[in-house]
Image (cartoon, rainbow, N blue to C red):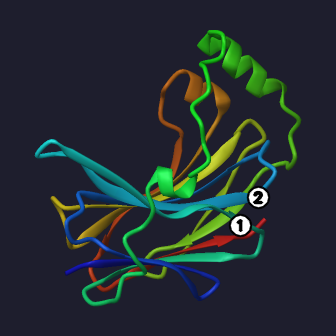
């Protein structure tokens, strides 16, 4: 068995048993217009395997502050923190709302550009298993950053890890942002993300 462990400031946020799952994803991200500095999500499941899909959420947009550290470990042994929750379990009182009037994609991005910016940017430091730190400092044009650690059952003994920044224009044009790091995390190792400023 393989377990994906996520810690925030050395405290367990989730330990996910990957058995019977196709994908498990850890995401940390933030934008200059979000109220919270950044947030952490851990989710995964089975998607269309033999006609069934089951999406689970272990951590749902946990707010993060400057100075906090997120660690992701890939372990051979562990005890899972439970099966995760479905969207229905997380939001039992949610009622579907009628779709709003159609708005164009261009209008959505124009609205986003008009939002007040709550911070000048981000500085984050990624420390992969080799111990060589990579610091990402967003530019004045960049809207936000994203860190991800992705596990899948095709390569169960490793994680794909990335850290990048992006502009509103790059998201609108559906082109990749600026990569600070792309790599693999092998079984028994970890990666550390420090939220510096």
Nearest to the observer: residue 130 or residue 89: 89
For the point 42% across and 67% down, the residue is 84
Image mark for residue 37? 2
- Local SS, label 2: loop
**As displayed, is residue 73 above or below residue 118?**
below
As drawn, 148 above or below 100: below
Is residue 129 something that shows in the picture? no
**Residue 162 as seen in the image, left or right of residue 8:** left
Residue 36, percent from left and from top? 78, 56
Q: Position of residue 109 (x, y in %)?
A: 68, 21
The residue located at (87%, 46%) in the rendering is 118
Residues packed near mark 2 inside 10 Å, few (<14), some (14 to 19) or many (20 plus): many
The reply to whether residue 133 is in sight is: yes
- Which of 148/91 is in front? 91
Q: Pointer 1 and pointer 2: residues touching (CB < 8 Å)?
A: yes
Q: Nearer the viewer, residue 182 or 20?
A: 20
The image shows residue 142 at horizontal and vertical percentages of 70, 39
Q: In which image quadrant can residue 106 be found?
A: top right
Label 1, secondary structure: give it.
strand
Alpha-carbon distance for marks 1 and 2?
6 Å
């Amino acid at each position: 068995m393989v377990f994906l462990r996520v810690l925030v400031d050395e405290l367990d946020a989730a330990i996910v048993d990957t058995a019977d799952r196709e994908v498990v994803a850890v995401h940390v991200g933030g934008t200059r217009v979000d109220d919270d500095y950044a947030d952490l999500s851990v989710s995964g499941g089975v998607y269309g395997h033999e006609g069934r899909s089951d999406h689970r959420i272990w951590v749902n947009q946990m707010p993060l502050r400057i100075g906090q550290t997120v660690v992701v470990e890939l372990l051979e042994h562990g005890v899972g923190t439970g099966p995760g929750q479905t969207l229905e379990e997380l939001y039992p009182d949610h009622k579907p709302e009628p779709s709003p009037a159609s708005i164009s994609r261009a209008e959505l991005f124009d609205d986003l550009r008009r939002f007040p910016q709550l911070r000048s940017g981000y500085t984050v430091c990624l420390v992969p298993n080799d111990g060589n730190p990579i610091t990402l400092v967003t530019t004045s044009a960049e809207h936000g950053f994203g860190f991800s650690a992705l596990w899948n059952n095709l390569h169960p003994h490793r994680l794909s890890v990335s850290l990048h920044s992006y502009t509103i224009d790059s998201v609108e044009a559906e082109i990749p942002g600026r990569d600070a790091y792309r790599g693999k995390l092998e079984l028994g190792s970890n990666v550390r993300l420090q939220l510096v400023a």
